[in-house]
Image: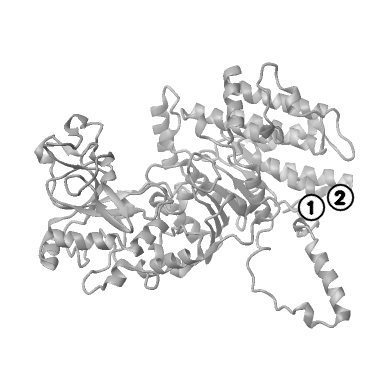
């Protein structure tokens, strides 16, 4: 969001602090402007700040943003971290979905150069090619009467179980109107009525439902499909009739806990559900803690008509979007389509593994778009965005993963650009790669780097994991664990001091003491290296209890910047150090320590060999490919592949372009 538009929202808050009043006033102004044929800026309440040019062109985006801010504040979150879903992004999803299966990759047809044709045929062939190029992408639908579709090609029923301010339905109506341009007036009116009666739009918020209802009426009027001042005509739907249909088909209900308000199952469901953990719900409510506990308990225990639990994929700290995905698959009819805009972390995070298994094993998951968190498509903070494409109750054989994508890779008229990078995951190899957790790897854009990453995954996928028992490193006993450093700087600040002349105490090691220079990872602590005075001298000495001092250990610094060359940096620290919680370390059972001493002569030598392997190029590519987000979770480190070091040469241990 530009500073100009964000400044307008800040000035609006100063002038009108009630967010519900903001939404209602905006809708009233938009409706009045539509009725009078004026821009919305001319009908805004007196005292409201002057509308900047960036917000003049699409009043719907302003409504989306106002509602998102209201809902964030209602939950106790900051309204500054929310964004409206970009209209061009929604149009690209709908365009791609409405042509599902028609633009799949096919073998290129046999071709013949025009220069090989006789001159008399050459002109005809060129004219024919030009006519093909001139055909609109939207021409690829059939205007035949079919109860399953409108004449304009929209599958019915069309559902959105988290309708918000009605963005997806708004864009569907606009696409419908564009496709109806060649129909006669009566046919266009009848097809519009068929579309509206086929809507199944739901939200848990009364404010969202009222906003969506009024928005759809305004959009219909602006497209000259509804008469705002009369009872309609041969070509226009009357306002009262439109309102009656909209109120019936845009309802306030909770699709997660309640029953679906319609008997017929959706044929197409497209939605951007809430990206909100249950623990973050009701933060602004005085009884928030009890409400969260009650909601979590109810969702975990609610059952379907057959007596089984409604949500089988609930695990850990549940995020609502995962429940919306599972519920959408239950609601949609067999063979129906589901498109969901969700965080990219769903593709790799451990807590989403049960959901991915459900999607793969019981449905046809055929496509996913991936926009990493640095690709200028902000929806919620710095999170990456993914778009899932699923056919309900089908069979997953190949998933086409498109990414990494940039906002320039999408088009309102074409969906995805033909040059967008993609990876086809065939079910067999994909299962081996992920141990049947069906995670989707994050791939680099460069073809050379993609090939390196794929070779690394193929080489390491069937190797034992770092914490796995029964391996050469850990033949028996307790598994290796990954732990955070023992000291929180905030809680122990009185026992931590800066390095300086005559410093006494023990080395205090933090993440900033581990560096990567020219491809080499090193420990840059003033106790162990010649480090000039600077940030590494700060908070470098421990003066607290001596029982906090640890043995020799392998420690890890996680690099949370996705643009960094490496994701994990590993070093060995000597005994007698204390670790800050900005680093992690391997907690090695006695059996592992004994094995290292037996294999390498002493513990330090064994730890150095392990650290060398953990810093290898192959493992770096692996960890970047399977990273769920910028944060590094302990389970991610624990599941790193760890083949035997015995007899392994330096090439396969460290990795290079030809051997990874």
Mark 2 crowd level (few <14, some 14–19, many ≥20, 10 Å Cα): some
Residue 16 visible, this angle: yes
Where residue 655 sits: x, y (%)?
34, 68
| Tag 2 and tag 1, C-beta contact below 8 Å | yes
Residue 263 lies, with reference to residue 566, above or below; the image says: above
Spatial CA distance of label 2 from label 1 is 9 Å
Q: Is residue 130 left or right of residue 58?
A: right
Residue drawn at x 27%, y 51% is 556
Q: Residue at x 54, y 56 (%)?
A: 368
- Residue 600 locus on image (x, y percent): 13, 66
Residue nearest the viewer, comparing 259 with 68: 68
Residue beneath the point at 63% across and 51% down: 93
The residue beneath circle 2 is 183
Q: Is residue 289 above or below residue 622?
A: above
Instruction: Indicate whether 125 appears above or below 21.
Output: below
Q: Circle 1 sits on which residue?
A: 151
Rendered image quadrant of residue 35: top right
Q: Quadrant of residue 130?
A: bottom right
């Amino acid at each position: 969001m530009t500073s100009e538009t964000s400044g307008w929202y800040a000035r609006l808050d100063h002038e009108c602090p009630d967010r519900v009043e903001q939404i209602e006033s905006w809708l009233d102004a938009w409706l009045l402007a539509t009725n009078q044929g004026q821009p919305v800026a001319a009908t805004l309440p007196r005292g409201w700040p002057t509308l900047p040019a960036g917000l003049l062109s699409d009043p719907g985006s302003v409504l989306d943003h106002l509602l998102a801010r209201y809902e964030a504040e209602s939950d106790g979150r900051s309204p500054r971290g929310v964004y409206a879903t970009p209209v061009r992004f929604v149009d690209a999803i709908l365009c791609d979905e409405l042509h599902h299966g028609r633009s799949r990759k096919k073998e290129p047809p046999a071709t013949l150069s025009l220069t090989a044709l006789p001159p008399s045929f050459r002109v005809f062939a060129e004219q024919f090619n030009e006519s093909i190029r001139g055909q609109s992408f939207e021409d690829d639908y059939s205007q035949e009467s079919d109860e399953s579709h409108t004449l304009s090609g929209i599958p019915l029923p069309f559902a959105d179980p988290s309708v918000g301010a009605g963005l997806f339905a708004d864009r569907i109506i606009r696409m419908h109107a564009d496709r109806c341009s060649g129909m006669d007036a009566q046919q266009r009116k009848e097809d519009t009525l068929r579309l509206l009666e086929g809507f199944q739009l739901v939200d848990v918020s009364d404010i969202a439902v009222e906003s969506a209802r009024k928005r759809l009426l305004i959009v219909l009027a602006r497209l000259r499909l509804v008469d705002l001042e009369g009872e309609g005509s041969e070509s226009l739907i009357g306002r009262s009739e439109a309102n009656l249909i909209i109120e019936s088909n845009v309802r306030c209900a909770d699709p997660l806990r309640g029953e679906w308000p319609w008997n017929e199952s959706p044929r197409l469901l497209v939605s951007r559900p809430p990206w909100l953990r249950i623990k973050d719900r009701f933060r602004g409510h005085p009884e928030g803690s009890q409400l969260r506990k009650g909601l979590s308990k109810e969702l975990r225990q609610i059952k379907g008509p057959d007596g089984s639990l409604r949500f089988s994929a609930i695990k850990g700290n549940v995020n609502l979007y995962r429940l919306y995905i599972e519920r959408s698959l239950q609601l949609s009819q067999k063979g129906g389509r589901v498109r969901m805009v969700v965080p990219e972390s769903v593709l790799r995070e451990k807590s989403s593994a049960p959901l991915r298994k459900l999607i793969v094993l019981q449905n046809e998951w055929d496509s996913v778009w991936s926009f990493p968190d640095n690709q200028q498509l902000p929806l919620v903070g710095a999170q990456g965005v993914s778009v899932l494409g699923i056919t309900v109750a089908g069979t997953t054989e190949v998933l086409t993963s498109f990414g990494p994508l940039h906002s320039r890779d999408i088009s309102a008229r074409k969906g995805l650009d033909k040059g967008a990078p993609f990876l086809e995951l065939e079910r067999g190899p994909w299962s081996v790669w992920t141990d049947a957790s069906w995670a989707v790897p994050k791939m680099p854009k460069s073809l050379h780097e993609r090939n390196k990453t794929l070779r690394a995954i193929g080489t390491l996928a069937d190797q034992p994991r770092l914490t796995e028992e029964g391996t050469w490193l850990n033949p028996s006993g307790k598994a290796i664990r990954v732990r955070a450093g023992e000291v929180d700087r905030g809680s122990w600040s009185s026992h931590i001091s800066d390095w300086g002349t005559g410093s006494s105490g023990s080395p205090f090691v933090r993440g900033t003491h581990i560096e990567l220079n020219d491809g080499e990872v090193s420990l840059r602590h003033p106790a162990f290296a010649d480090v000039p005075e600077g940030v590494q001298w700060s908070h470098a000495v421990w003066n607290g209890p001596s029982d906090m001092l640890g043995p020799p250990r392998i420690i890890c610094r996680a690099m949370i910047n996705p643009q960094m060359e490496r994701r994990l940096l590993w070093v060995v620290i000597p005994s007698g150090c204390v670790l800050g919680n900005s680093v992690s370390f391997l907690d090695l059972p006695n059996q592992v320590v004994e094995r290292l001493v037996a294999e390498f002569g002493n513990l330090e030598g064994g730890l150095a060999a392990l650290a060398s392997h953990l810093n290898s190029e192959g493992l770096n590519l692996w960890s970047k490919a399977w990273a769920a987000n910028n944060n590094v979770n302990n389970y991610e480190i624990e599941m790193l592949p760890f083949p035997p070091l015995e007899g392994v040469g330096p090439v396969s241990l460290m990795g290079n372009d030809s051997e990874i």
